[in-house]
Image (cartoon, rainbow, N blue to C red):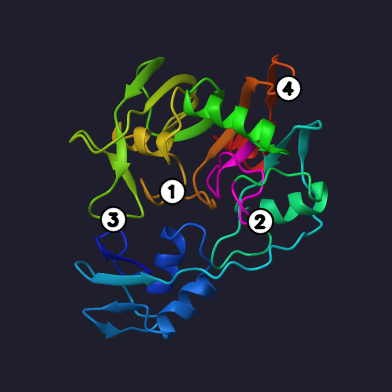
């Protein structure tokens, strides 16, 4: 069982506990969080709480995550947006709101469920039944291109490219504020937050891993900036953490920014536009791009 404590700050004050935890415990549904609360796995000062209990500043939530029971992950027919496919690889354009692989509270409706229906048993087994074929992931509310491996041969070679940071990845984002410089680089290590394990943070104490993000301004608006980000490394929440560190958090990012806006958004405005790698079988460079989702294009028009 995994245990951790969360200290509520002003940003979360007044929010229902189940709503707060469902948002910050990425990959866990609100109904699953409510079951944890009712079963006594979530408490305040060792006292039980209710799902609709409101967060207050300074409240310490004690959370116990029980070891998950590994279920039979079922194939689910779904309309996957396949950008490229051959006998080794499949590139998918992941929509907003879709979880990549099953986790407690999300055993159905994930990308893996759809891939099992599409590919059958033609997925790498290296990461087990919960994550067949998955070599990397993007956040639930981030859209865009993601590569999946159909066999262990391709999985090992793509994973090696990820480890040595040779895979090319380009993201598009809208951030709060107007960036003055046309381009720049953020080279700051990222590690798990000591105050809130649900967040990543810039950690220059020696505990963080090197993280490098190159950015370029594409268009400036009155209160926002449209940028392109190129990842030299691929740390969890890297772009979100780095831009927040620059005081330009991503529009819609309630975890690292949560700045007021009149736009009704579902999570951060971030799109994985391009992924390029050396094909594990042919040795040739392969680059796949994903078009902007409709909500992103509309938002740019509004701005």
Tag 1 or tag 3, which sits nearer the N-term? Answer: 3
Horizontal and vertical percent position of residue 26: 47, 57
- Depth check, mark 1 against mark 2: the one in front is 2
Tag 1 or tag 4, which sits nearer the N-term? Answer: 1
The magenta segment is: 127-145
Q: Using the image, determine if residue 257 lies above or below residue 58.
A: above
- Residue pointed to by mark 4: 281
Tag 4 or tag 2, which sits nearer the N-term? Answer: 2
Element on which disc 3 rests: loop
Element on which disc 4 rests: loop
Instruction: Give me the C-alpha separation between circle 3 and circle 2.
Output: 26 Å
Tag 3 or tag 4, which sits nearer the N-term? Answer: 3
Seen from the viewer's position, the closer of residues 94 and 68 is 68
Dot 4 alpha-carbon crowd within 10 angstroms: few under 14, some 14 to 19, many 20 or more:
few
| Residue 110: image tag | 2
| Residue 223: image tag | none
Instruction: Give me the C-alpha separation between circle 1 and circle 2.
Output: 29 Å
State left or right for residue 167 relative to residue 223.
right
Dot 3 alpha-carbon crowd within 10 angstroms: few under 14, some 14 to 19, many 20 or more:
some
Tag 2 or tag 3, which sits nearer the N-term? Answer: 2
Q: Using the image, determine if residue 149 lies above or below residue 252.
A: above
Q: Give the residue displayed 32% in from the left and 36% down from the top.
A: 190
Instruction: Give me the C-alpha separation between circle 3 and circle 1.
Output: 25 Å
Element on which disc 2 rests: loop
Horizontal and vertical percent position of residue 240: 41, 38
Q: Using the image, determine if residue 41 lies above or below residue 11.
A: below
State left or right for residue 143 relative to residue 30.
right
Horizontal and vertical percent position of residue 14: 32, 70
| Residue 196: image tag | 3
């Amino acid at each position: 069982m995994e245990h951790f404590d969360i200290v509520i700050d002003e940003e979360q004050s007044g929010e229902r506990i189940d709503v707060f935890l469902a948002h910050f415990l990425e990959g866990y549904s609100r109904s699953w969080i409510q079951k944890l609360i009712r079963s006594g796995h979530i408490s305040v000062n060792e006292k039980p709480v209710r799902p609709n209990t409101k967060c207050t500043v300074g409240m310490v939530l004690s959370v116990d995550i029980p070891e998950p029971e590994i279920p039979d992950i079922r194939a689910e027919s779904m309309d996957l947006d396949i950008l490229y496919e051959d006998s080794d690889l499949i590139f998918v354009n992941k929509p907003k709101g879709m979880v990549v692989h099953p986790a407690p509270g999300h055993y159905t409706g994930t990308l893996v469920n759809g891939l099992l229906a599409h590919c059958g048993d033609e997925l790498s087994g290296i990461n087990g039944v919960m994550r067949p074929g998955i070599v990397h992931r993007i956040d639930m509310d981030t859209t865009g291109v993601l590569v999946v491996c159909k066999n262990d041969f391709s999985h090992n070679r793509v994973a090696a490219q990820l480890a040595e940071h040779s895979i090319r990845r380009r993201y598009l984002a809208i951030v709060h504020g107007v960036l003055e410089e046309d381009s720049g680089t953020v080279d700051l290590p990222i590690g798990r937050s000591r105050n809130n394990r649900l967040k990543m943070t810039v950690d220059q104490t020696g505990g963080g891993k090197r993280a490098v993000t190159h950015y370029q301004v594409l268009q400036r608006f009155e209160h926002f900036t449209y940028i392109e980000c190129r990842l030299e490394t691929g740390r969890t929440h890297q772009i979100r953490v780095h831009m927040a560190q620059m005081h330009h958090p991503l529009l819609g990012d309630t975890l690292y920014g949560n700045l007021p806006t009149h736009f009704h958004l579902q999570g951060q405005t971030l799109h994985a536009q391009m992924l390029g790698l050396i094909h594990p079988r042919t040795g040739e460079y392969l680059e796949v791009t994903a078009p902007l989702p409709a909500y992103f294009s509309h938002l740019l028009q509004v701005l």
